[in-house]
Amino acid sequence: MNVFYHFGRYFLLIKQAFGKPEKAAIYRDRIFEEMNYLGIGSIGIVAIISVFIGAVITIQSAFNFESPLIPDYAVGVAVRDSMILEFSPAIVSLILAGKIGSSIASEIGTMRVTEQIDALEIMGINSAGYLILPKIIAYVLFNPVLVVFSMFLGILGGYVFGLMAGVVTDYEYIEGITFDFRPYNVIYALIKSGVFAFLIASVPAYHGYYTKGGALEVGRSSTRGVVYTSVLILTFDLILTQILLV
């Protein structure tokens, strides 16, 4: 029953967050602030992880594809499909759930225990809309950009490190990443990235918004937000794969 209680309270909070804003201009400014903080601030870690994962996939694929029955361009195909279908939308989202989710839960949780949220409500401001809605909109809009950026850097990293390690030639790699390319796979990845972004922004916000106590409870809310977000990302990853690819 506790699960249903939290689900119900979560959906009521989201409904409140999507209520009519008091002043649209303020929300617009906050959306750009959140894009800068949540999105642009995550470019560095996404770039580093994507480049090295692309390199690792290339080297491991070349090591495992030594059979003469496997074409030389298979390494490029493996890197392309691994980055587009799973790594960039799902694994990057899991990593960012820790970085961004903990930040959101801690920020809102601190505002709750220091009674800043109560002060907003006393002034007649929709606190859920003011604090949560800009984060959801900003990250849902920016996360697909991060995912495309991750795809590009992962494939590029595989190319550069594959050549440096001597496990693949430039012709073989380029032939592989262009062989039987399906644009729908990119659309599939972007759909997943949008759903994951909504979870990353809203679930930790829920845990932060209903924090009670002091600094210790803020830390616990942050941890719960990251854990539940990660589980939901994996769950929806399976569901969306079943719906969109099968």
Image (cartoon, grey):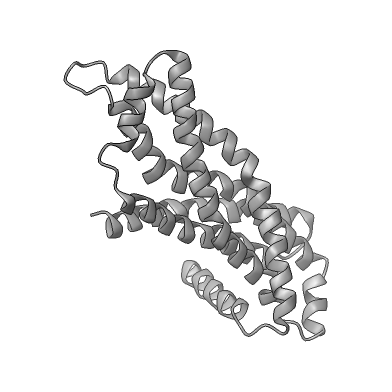
Task: Answer with left or right where residue 225 lies relative to residue 179.
Answer: right
**Residue 21 position within the rendered picture, expressed as x and y whole percent measured from the top left:** 67, 82
* Residue 47 in view, yes or no: yes
**Residue 69 position within the rendered picture, expressed as x and y whole percent measured from the top left:** 16, 20
Question: Image height check: is 114 above or below 102?
Answer: below
Q: Residue at x 34, y 20 (%)?
A: 62
Q: Nearer the viewer, residue 67 or 232?
A: 67
Total tally of numbered discs in the picture: 0
Q: Residue at x 58, y 37 (%)?
A: 47
Question: Image height check: is 121 above or below 188?
Answer: below
Task: Answer with left or right where residue 55 lies relative to residue 240.
Answer: right
Question: Image height check: is 4 above or below 200?
Answer: below
Picture quadrant where residue 218 is located: bottom right
Quadrant location of the C terminus? bottom left
Picture quadrant where residue 57 is located: top left
**Residue 112 position within the rendered picture, expressed as x and y whole percent measured from the top left:** 76, 67
* Residue 220 in view, yes or no: no
Q: Residue at x 63, y 71 (%)?
A: 133
Q: Residue at x 72, y 56 (%)?
A: 106
Q: Nearer the viewer, residue 110 or 75?
A: 75
Q: Nearer the viewer, residue 122 or 3?
A: 122
Residue that protrudes farthest toward the top in the picture: 166
**Residue 200 position within the rendered picture, expressed as x and y whole percent measured from the top left:** 56, 57
Residue that protrudes farthest toward the left in the picture: 69
